[in-house]
Amino acid sequence: MIHVLALVETIEGHREDFLREFAQVAVPVRQEAGCIEYGAAIDAVTDVPQQFLQGEDFVLIVEKWESLDHLKAHLVAPHMADYRVRVKPFVSSVRLQILDPRV
């Protein structure tokens, strides 16, 4: 299994536009072979002093895949190509971390 964290910085004022498109693509992604988890998250409002806040223009996509091959297939899936076109006007940058869980 692998974990994937994609930190998406949206263009100011367009986070909800991005999340609306993400909600649509999440349905077919969760049906892909090897998808264990696929969801978006934003900063929670807490009183935890150690919390690091990304800010109002950020979305963290949390994914789990059975294997790297499953992730690679996901990245080239037709619905993902369409999704990238739809969200391009809302996205400033994307940083991807692919992690190998140890515990």
Image (cartoon, rainbow, N blue to C red):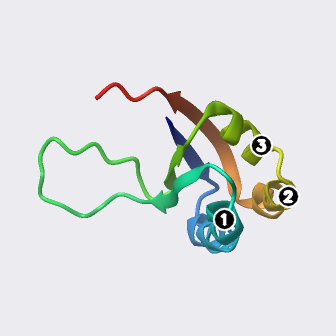
| Amino acid type shown at disc 1 | Gln
Q: Residues within 10 Å of mark 3 (few under 14, many from 20)?
A: few
| Amino acid type shown at disc 3 | Ala
Residue 85: assigned label: 2
Comes first in the chain, label 2 or label 1: 1
Q: CA distance from mark 2 to mark 1?
A: 21 Å
Q: CA distance from mark 1 to mark 3?
A: 13 Å
Q: Residue at x 73, y 47 (%)?
A: 74
Would you place residue 51 above or below residue 100 in this image?
Answer: below
Expressed as whole percent of the image width and height from the top left, the position of residue 16 reads 57, 72
Q: Mark 3 touching mark 2, by CB under 8 A?
A: no
Element carrying mark 2:
helix
Q: Quadrant of residue 96?
A: top right
Comes first in the chain, label 3 or label 2: 3
Where is mark 3, residue-wise? 73
Q: Is residue 51 left or right of residue 82?
A: left
Where is mark 1, residue-wise? 31
Q: Is residue 27 left or right of residue 101?
A: right
Expressed as whole percent of the image width and height from the top left, the position of residue 78 reads 87, 56
Q: Mark 2 touching mark 1, by CB under 8 A?
A: no
Residue 1: assigned label: none
Element carrying mark 3:
helix
| Amino acid type shown at disc 2 | Val
Element carrying mark 1:
loop
Expressed as whole percent of the image width and height from the top left, the position of residue 11 reads 64, 56
